[in-house]
Image (tube, grey):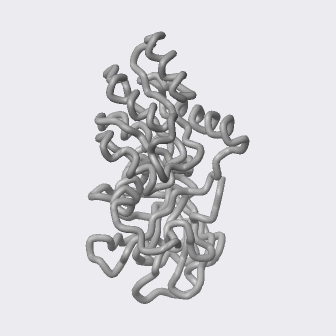
Amino acid sequence: MNILVYTQSFYVRKTFINALIPMGISVFQTDHLTTLFDTVRKNSIEMIVFDVIQENYDEVFPELIKIKQGTETGLPEKISLLMLIGSVDKAQITRALQLGVIGFIKSNASEETISKYTMEIYQKIRGIPPERKYVRVSLNTSIESERIGVKFRSTLNMQLILGVIKDISAGGIAVELVGTFDKEAIENGMEVKNMQFMLDSRDVLVNAVVVAYQKNFCAFRFTHLSQQDREAMSQFIFDKISRTSELPVKGPENPAETPPEGSPAQSQE
């Protein structure tokens, strides 16, 4: 599921990222209405959240009219429209409902409330719950800026093992192992404590279990993430998919949705 949040607020953006990316929902954001429909078309957006906390209804309503009247070409057939509101203005809410808005979220809603409500709205409109597959991003390890080193100790023989992250999701990572290590130091199902890597200068420590291992490739499913580490990972994934969405599409295949066999992105909770 892809959701677009129209907001100028860093706090609102952060709240939706933390609430939805760990739930398997790709979050995109725009702070300009002029780019709204291009973002929808590029990323197959299924739901739009309009932030009207500042009561800027007059700016948003013309865009709702375009969607309702179908004057914008190339949009998905079904787009669920929500509003993030500060106060309850009955007249404005009535008008929003007339223009196709189907739900409202209060500005003080918790992350848990946002994720639960979003899922409920999606299922109500589509008849089925959204697919709960982790949002996965691939890293180009041939580029220095995208090389993220990882280290952990084998629980079988306590050997220190090094690697480079190939892809990452809120559910786990796939790693290219590097250096010399005992091949028997890793096995499927092995638990790893305090696996360490850096995300945007933040030191992340996670517990994980090996879900796939062959030669120099190993995939891990996270078994424990602190709230701070989960938020750091969600922000990293958001930044990566946002940058990727700005690039021209080269073909019909989207590498971010075709993980290699055994990748943690294929695990669902």
Res. 199 in view: yes
In the image, residue 6 above or below residue 44: above
Q: In the orientation shown, which residue stands out farthest toward the top? A: 90
Which of the 4 image quadrants contains residue 54? top left
Total marks drawn?
A: 0
Q: Residue at x 56, y 38 (%)?
A: 80
Of 17 and 210, the residue lying toward us: 17
81, above or below 162, in the image: above
Please tell me which residue lies in front, 92 or 107: 92
Quadrant position of residue 49: top left
Is 121 on the left or on the right of 138, as rendered?
A: right
Which residue is at the far right?
A: 127
In the rendered view, tell whether residue 183 sits above or below residue 248. Answer: below
Residue at position x 57%, y 36% in the image? 118
Residue 229 seen in this snapshot: no
How far across and how far down the image is residue 85, in percent? 42, 22
> Which residue is depicted at the point 37% across and 39% down?
13
Residue 86 in which image quadrant? top left
Percent of width and height locating residue 194: 46, 61
Q: Residue at x 34, y 36 (%)?
A: 7
Q: Position of residue 214 (x, y in %)?
A: 59, 84
Residue 104 drawn at (x, y percent): 51, 24
Determine whether, in the image, residue 236 is placed left or right of residue 114. left
Q: Nearer the viewer, residue 57 or 124?
A: 57
